[in-house]
Amino acid sequence: MINSNVEELKTLLLKLEQQSSEMAGILSEEHSLLNATDANALFSIAQQKKHIIYSLEQTTKVTHKFLLNLNVKHGLYGLSAYINLQPVDTKKSLEEIWLSTQQLIENNKQMNETNGSIIELNRRFTQRSLDVLRGQMGSITETYSSSGISQKNTYTRNISIV
């Protein structure tokens, strides 16, 4: 691989690493806000998250296409094997960046799943609270029709207007 291609690949991988690091910060802030009551701040962080996800997707596509143009089999999926074929000095620098990026991606995935779980629990709690206010009886508020579609129980006693 010629030197300019190595430098361009390093630049692309560093950009992925930097964006993944930004995503980690946003996910961490989101986690903190999920335990707070500031809806506006949570909305703002959701917008930041949306923006960085778009940027990550674009950078990933560019990097993948760049690798395919270098005849790297499977693009990003074959990057580790491709790095192993490089001279020692090139291999070491690319490997450090790629390993760091992979670790950030895995940590981001775990943080995002944790945040998603918190959101789902909050959603269920809110739904149950609304069901109580609507007078839904029992802990199971959905049943299945003969066609297998879930439906709310029809027997209710409203105790509040929502």
Image (spheres, rainbow, N blue to C red):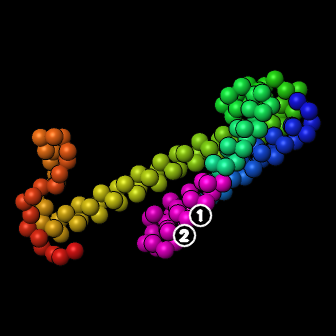
Calculate the distance from the C-alpha at mark 2 to the C-alpha at mark 1: 6 Å
Q: Which residue lies furthest to the right in this view?
A: 3
Residue 152 picture location, percent across and down: 16, 55
Label 1 sits on residue: 48
Residue in the picture at 53% in, 50% down: 111
User: What span is colored magenta in the figure?
Assistant: 27-55
Q: Can residue 41 be seen in this view?
A: yes
- Is residue 153 depicted above or below 91 in this figure? below
Residue in the picture at 77% in, 38% down: 66
Label 2 sits on residue: 44
Could you classify mark 2 by the number of other residues whose Cα lies within 10 Å: few (under 14), some (14-19), or many (20 or more)?
few
Task: Please name the predominant secondary structure of the magenta segment in the image.
Answer: helix
Residue 76 picture location, percent across and down: 69, 34
Residue 114 picture location, percent across and down: 46, 50
Q: Quadrant of residue 121?
A: bottom left
Residue in the picture at 61% in, 54% down: 54
Mark 2: which amino acid? Ser
Label 2 with label 1: CB-CB less than 8 Å: yes
Pick the residue in front: 77 or 126: 77
Using residue 120 as the reference point, say whether residue 71 is left or right of it.
Answer: right
Using residue 78 as the reference point, say whether residue 43 is left or right of it.
Answer: left
